[in-house]
Amino acid sequence: MNKKTEISCAEYPDVKLRMIKEDEIEMLRIWKNNNADSFFYTKEISPDQQLKWYEGYISRDNDFMLAVYYQENLVGCIGFRILEDKLIDIYNVILGVEGFASKGIMARTMEMLTTYLAGNYEFDITAKVLITNKAINWYKKNGFSIAEEKEDYYLILYDKSFLKNNLQIKTVQRI
């Protein structure tokens, strides 16, 4: 996968996952700041810090941040990175636009991404979720279970048998 990939599927034509571009990082910064209590880094992120993060992100070959589009509206983001110990770490799962809550957009996003990852990598799919993050139940509904409980977070593991729809994932490279 490269930094210009778009993921879609016929089953969910209203949802597209696109690698973020520089003109989208300000919205991601705002969403992250608005949801800071759900993440490990809880300090306010400045525009300069976000730009510095993006410049580093572009140079990391195994780190991917996808903008979530619903009906062509930017509504959220989801990231994943391939770790050296042959694990995939999903991170920064954010539905940033409140008006799109409870529509199943992020569940479809997670299903599309995990289907793509399971079809392209033999690695375990994991995430780290703060113990205080109420989204842990959402992760469980979407195929994850707690593999380990650490001092302040859960290491969760995706159960690939949860892949129920056999989505026909399509990837295209944007210009």
Image (cartoon, rainbow, N blue to C red):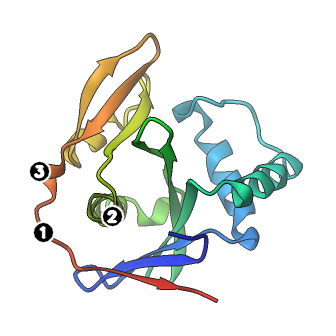
Residue position for label 3: 161
Residue position for label 2: 120
| Image: 161 above or below 165 | above
- Front residue (pair 110, 46): 110
| Image: 53 above or below 85 | below
The residues tagged by marks 2 and 1 sit, at their Cα atoms, a distance apart of 17 Å
Task: Estimate the x, y position of residue 46 in percent, counting from the top left.
Answer: 84, 45
Q: Residue at x 36, y 27 (%)?
A: 155
The residues tagged by marks 3 and 2 sit, at their Cα atoms, a distance apart of 15 Å
Res 92 seen here: no
- Front residue (pair 102, 59): 59
Q: Residue at x 62, y 52 (%)?
A: 31
Q: Please, what is the three-letter code of the amino acid marked with disc 1? A: Asn
- Front residue (pair 64, 139): 64
Residue position for label 1: 165
| Mark 2 residue element | helix
Task: Estimate the x, y position of residue 98 in percent, counting from the top left.
Answer: 49, 59
Res 6 seen here: yes
In contact (CB < 8 Å): disc 2 and disc 1: no
Outermost residue, top direction?
151
Q: Please, what is the three-letter code of the amino acid marked with disc 3? A: Ser
Mark 2: give few (<14), some (14-19) or many (20+) Cα within 10 Å.
Answer: few
The residues tagged by marks 3 and 1 sit, at their Cα atoms, a distance apart of 11 Å
Task: Estimate the x, y position of residue 65 in percent, counting from the top left.
Answer: 57, 59
**In this picture, residue 52 sits left or right of residue 115:** right
Q: Please, what is the three-letter code of the amino acid marked with disc 2? A: Asn
Q: Residue at x 28, y 36 (%)?
A: 157
User: Upstream in the sequence, badge 3 or badge 2?
Assistant: 2
